[in-house]
Amino acid sequence: MSLGKSLYDARKKSGLSQEAVAEKLGISRQTVSKWELDETVPDIMQAKKLSTIYNVTLDELIKFDIDVMKLEDTIKNTSEEVQNKVDWTKLWASKYPILEKYKSEVQTEEYMSTLKVLLDKLKKDYNYNDLDAFLVLKDILAYLWNNKKA
């Protein structure tokens, strides 16, 4: 998330308009807009005042991560043609070796047939195409993984 998006989200959560924030800070509405559009950034004193106005800590207000933002921009700006040239399994396997190792250990046919049933159900129930059904199933698995402690 960019700093501008973080500022926008905090302002919206607080229920304030750009005009109201500008008035509280003694600046123009256009300045607030430029911050939220990532055209400029507030100085540290303005950022501290914003955190008070939005009732969040300064850390929460500037929670964006520049490395994540760069990665997100790279993904957004990479053409589908280039993405199709990438061997994603090999790339992820360099970080997670199990992605290569499991192929000689796991009886994948059993899992594939179960997953195919789930994919077909998503396609039928929601009229999803193959890719959309796959992405939804992937997202459901990611949700299960991220909430495994709950």
Image (cartoon, rainbow, N blue to C red):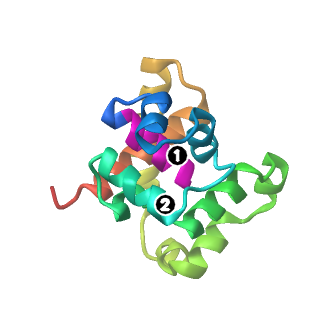
Report the residue marked by disc 2: 64
SS for dot 1? helix
Q: Which residues are magenta?
A: 1-12
Give the amino acid type for the residue marked by disc 1 in the picture. Answer: Lys
In the rendered view, tell whether residue 111 sits above or below residue 43. Answer: above
Pick the front one: 98 or 107: 98
Cβ–Cβ under 8 Å for marks 1 and 2: yes
Residue 111 location, x and y as percent? 40, 53
Look at the image and tell me whether residue 122 can be seen: yes
- Tell me what residue is drawn at x 31 percent, y 58 percent: 145
> What label sits on residue 81 in the rendered view?
none
Tell me, yes or no, if residue 142 can be seen here: no
Residue 91: name its quadrant.
Answer: bottom right
Horizontal and vertical percent for residue 7? 47, 47
**Helix, strand or loop for disc 2:** loop
Q: Earlier in the sequence, mark 1 or mark 2?
A: 1
Q: Residue at x 40, y 39 (%)?
A: 24
Could you classify mark 2 by the number of other residues whose Cα lies within 10 Å: few (under 14), some (14-19), or many (20 or more)?
some
Q: Is residue 8 magenta?
A: yes
Q: Find residue 15 and report its horizontal and vertical position in percent.
A: 34, 29
Give the main secondary structure of the magenta stretch: helix
Occupied quadrant, residue 115: top left
Q: Is residue 116 left or right of residue 73?
A: left
What's the distance in space between the residues labelled 1 and 2, CA to CA? 9 Å
Q: Is residue 60 left or right of residue 105?
A: left
